[in-house]
Amino acid sequence: MDQESWLSCEKTAVLQGGFLLASQICQPEPLSSLKKEDWNQIGSPIVNAVKEICGHPLKHTKDTLFWRKKILCIVWSKLLEIRNTEDIDIRWKDDPLFAVQNSLPDINHTLLFELVKSMSFSTIYVELLLCFQPSERCRELELLVNHVTSNSTEVDVKLFLEVWWELLKGRRGPLDTLDHLFTAQCSCLLTSTTEPSPLASKRFKPDPESSSMCMLNVLFEGLREIKERLTSSEICYFALSNCLDTLYTYYLLNSALDLPIELKLQNVSRTVNLRKKNESVDGFDLVEVIREVERDLAAALTPAETKPCGMTFIQAMQITLEIICSWEVMGLLKTPTNDLSATSIRLKESLSRVLASLEKLSHAKDLIGNGQTLNNLRVSLKGLLTSLSFNVPESSTAELANISMVIIDNHLNGFQGLPEIFASKLSQDFSEAEWIECLERNKSMFQTKHLVMTLISTLIAKSQSDAGVQHCKKLKDVIVDIFCQLSLPDKNSTLSQILSISKKGLHGFLPSSVTAGFAEELNLSFNSIIQSGTNSSLDAAVSAVAQVAFQNPEAALRRCCQMAVVNLGSHTLIAKILQHLPGLMSSPKVHKDTRDNLMCRCLQDTVWSKLSSTQEENQFLQFVTELMKCDLIGSEGEKQSFLPPQEVLRVFVQPYLFSASSCNLELCLRLLRSTLTQDSESDSVHWVMSCSPFPLLYCLAQLLNECCRCWEPPVEGNTPLLIESKELLLSVLHTLRTIVGKEVVRAPDDWSRALFWLYSQVEELDWTVRLCLKEVWGKHFKYEVPNSLLAVCDLPEQEWSGLHLPQYGQGTGLLAWLECCTLSDSVHRAMMDSLSLNLLKPDEVNMFSKGLLVAVSQILPWCTAGEWDRLLKVLQELLQSNKLYVPFSLEYVDFLPLLDLRSFSVELRLSVFLLRIFQLLCSPSCSDWMLPQGWVHTGRLYATAMRGVINAVCEKLPLPSTTGSPKSSVEKSGACSQEVLFVLGQLFCHVLHVQVMIPGQPEALFLCALEILTHYEAVLSAYPDSCTALQGLNTRHFFTTIADNLQCTEMKAVLHQKIAQL
């Protein structure tokens, strides 16, 4: 606080005038020699000045309270100035009160105490007293006690007791500006008095004994000294209540007691009613009275911050007992006959608390050797409590309601449990409109998840009673507003609680008349989210969904599902929103039945059976996949997903796989693959093991077994699995068998029974299907293959065993060998390493090559892209190791080319081998054996193989525009450009030959031919010297002649145009 604010003030001048006038009246004696009995004559100018400054004594405005404390701070600082040894040249600069103090005459403590007494400044006096250090505080308090015990009057006693009570209650709140200022003054005083000074002998010296004396000792001894001068029962009740509360809070109470809010309200209301009777209406500040009553209650129920020193519990008891006996003899503790007062009620409550505490054995053990004193005190207190046999009046519910509304409207502290009973019990004691308006005015006081649930219970009760619909709707809106202001964790906790009670949330208990208009609100919320899209704040979108989900979780989730699938690109945003609202997750503890999983049910009812396009299927799959990610942390730190993958498996996969339903089988498999790729705790059993994994494996094995009929004409009521879905099926089966296989290895005894069940079930399936499950069998069963395979392979008997299969007779070993090669990389490597072929016997190599051609022709149409890729690797390895003999014919060459084609031998021979396969497949003896879709599939596989060959050829000739190689390197590589052009020409002829042979002439081969021409043109552009003009003309004529064999005129025209550009 700056100095100007203390000097430039008219009120400060009034105060100075009062003191100067009092000093004149006191002449010839100085004002510092004022005696207690002279105050009424000399102190009136000071009192009048203070009254003029502070205004009406009963008005407690902020400015009035400030000036009361300011005046007392000035006066007390003037007294401390006497004890300040600091140099005056320093003080006038650093002390903001220096100028004010110098304008006042010298004073003494008598003036301070009489001013406090005259103006009823006891509360302010204690606030400033608490600014002192403990030792100085005791010294100042002792001065006050000495003052009031000298020639005591009833007013002196009242001041003494009020100061005592205020000391028990402690500071009102945080330190204000004046408190900080006065604390600094006290600190300077303490510092200056501890420094040696030449004038120290003339200054005040605190007595060491007195400094260490406890305030309790000062208070109790002071009361003992003036006990004979108390003449009224009311003042005795006040004094005895102080004694008992001091005993209780300093010696008997270890932790604060939390009084039930109903009792606290009764206490406050009762005290307010008593105060109204004794005070004028004009000066009655209800809010301030309530604050004060709450302070009184807290003081009596809160243990002292510091333990007493200088006075033991026994000493305090003895003084209390002595005082009680003295007043009983004087007849001052008789039962009140007139109207009850707040003081008598307080005494009765203090007696009850102390007696109850004294009855505890723990305190009795601490008083060994002083049992008689304790017993005497108990007897006296019990007798006194018995004499106070009046009934404490109780306030009516209307009075309690009125007090509670004042507390809530003014956000008064110390009534933590009030909002809850206001939201529940007290709601019946108001008119509907008045209660709801108060609730709306003070929504911030009800922003906890517990109070929201309490308000919901009240709303439900009112909606089921005779409350008006409009009031219920208004209350619902207020509750929704309060919910919206909760933190996100509290929102989720509230949503979880509501969902555990009803899937429809509030709407599960409210009549339709109260919930009218929700459909429009739901539409508006989601339309704004979708229209804003990613540009809107995610937090705002989460809040909007939480708001409608709070009212009806099921409706909100249904709309989320619908929006995520129907609106293009919305699935990501909706998934992010739901990931922020784990409160909408179905708790497995509450919903044990899968059908009770709300999210699964909403997906099933709103979109699952209504997916009408591939786009919707993809968004559904991506939406579910996002919800299955373990991005959430549970209450115990465990990872969680909004939609558990096991629930997706049970609801959307197993019912349709187990029942062979006509549902979209490919979507089910994609969902299954997505669930199996979700994280699982590494140190625990995989979640899929709780979802019937062995029956699931059997269903997948059956589907794989049925894939061999994919090119048969469909039978009514039985749609075969498409070849495109076989790749997906193999992927899912691979993932599942890997997971199950690891769990079987981890605990073989736990799964042995299920393992043998699965093995017995798949015995009826194709041997290749059983071989796919070898990872599940582990070491329980061997690899089981046809006996014919063992004739072409040297396989160890410890791991492999033969099967007698009628369809695999003599000469089918290579077919079985190739089928094994397509199963997995590990089996493929085992087959290559164990192949029994003697390269030194030409006939054996020749027979192997012919048999391999037939075997590849047999399995090619049923190969997936992955299986075909493995098969191509087998062919390449066999060609590179010269185990596969494929002579290259010159059927597309008019003249022998003088070129070195050795580096392209594998590519050329592989292309010829594939050509021979399709010549066999498309021969008259094999006509009409496959559906048109089968030919399209085989055409795609051939095109894939030829693209691999084309890329391998082109990699051997880097182009200058793409390599950045030095000129010399390019020239060197250009030496094989003629060979590359020749090979590309041969590949072009092979591709068109196959396209012409295949029924329907698949488009995939046409695109492959175009790609070859593009590479051919690129080589010509990079190496123009590799082809003469005549050679180019002949080549274009030759390519055009080949292209003329195509049936489709559009394809033929495009190829002609491309050839002409070469």
Image (cartoon, rainbow, N blue to C red):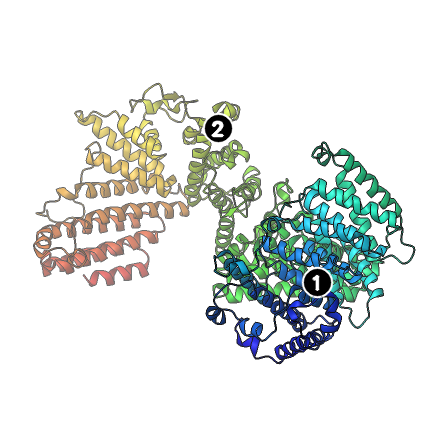
Q: Quadrant of residue 157?
A: bottom right
Q: Quadrant of residue 510?
A: bottom right
Question: Quarter of the image containing the C terminus?
Answer: bottom left
Residue 692 visible in rendering: no
Residue 161 visible in rendering: yes
Q: CA distance from mark 1 to mark 2?
A: 96 Å
Pick the residue in front: 807 or 63: 63
Q: Residue furthest right?
A: 337
User: Could you tell me residue 426's position as x and y percent?
Assistant: 78, 57
Question: Quarter of the image containing the N terminus?
Answer: bottom right
Residue lying at 47% horizontally and 36% vertically, measured from the top left: 706
Mark 2, Cα crowd under 10 Å, few <14 / some 14-19 / many 20+, is some
Residue lying at 24% horizontally and 32% vertically, measured from the top left: 849
Residue 762: assigned label: 2
Residue beneath label 1, please?
Answer: 122
Pick the residue in front: 835 or 787: 835
Query: Mark 1 against mark 2, which lies toward the viewer?
Result: 1
As helix, strand or loop, the secondary structure at mark 2 comes to: helix
Q: Mark 2 belongs to which amino acid?
A: Val
Q: Quadrant of residue 506?
A: bottom right
As helix, strand or loop, the secondary structure at mark 1 comes to: helix
User: Could you tell me residue 593's position as x and y percent?
Assistant: 64, 40
| Relative to 1053, residue 987 above or below | above
In this rendering, position of residue 71 left or right of residue 976: right
User: Could you tell me residue 908's position as x and y percent?
Assistant: 19, 43
Residue 887: assigned label: none
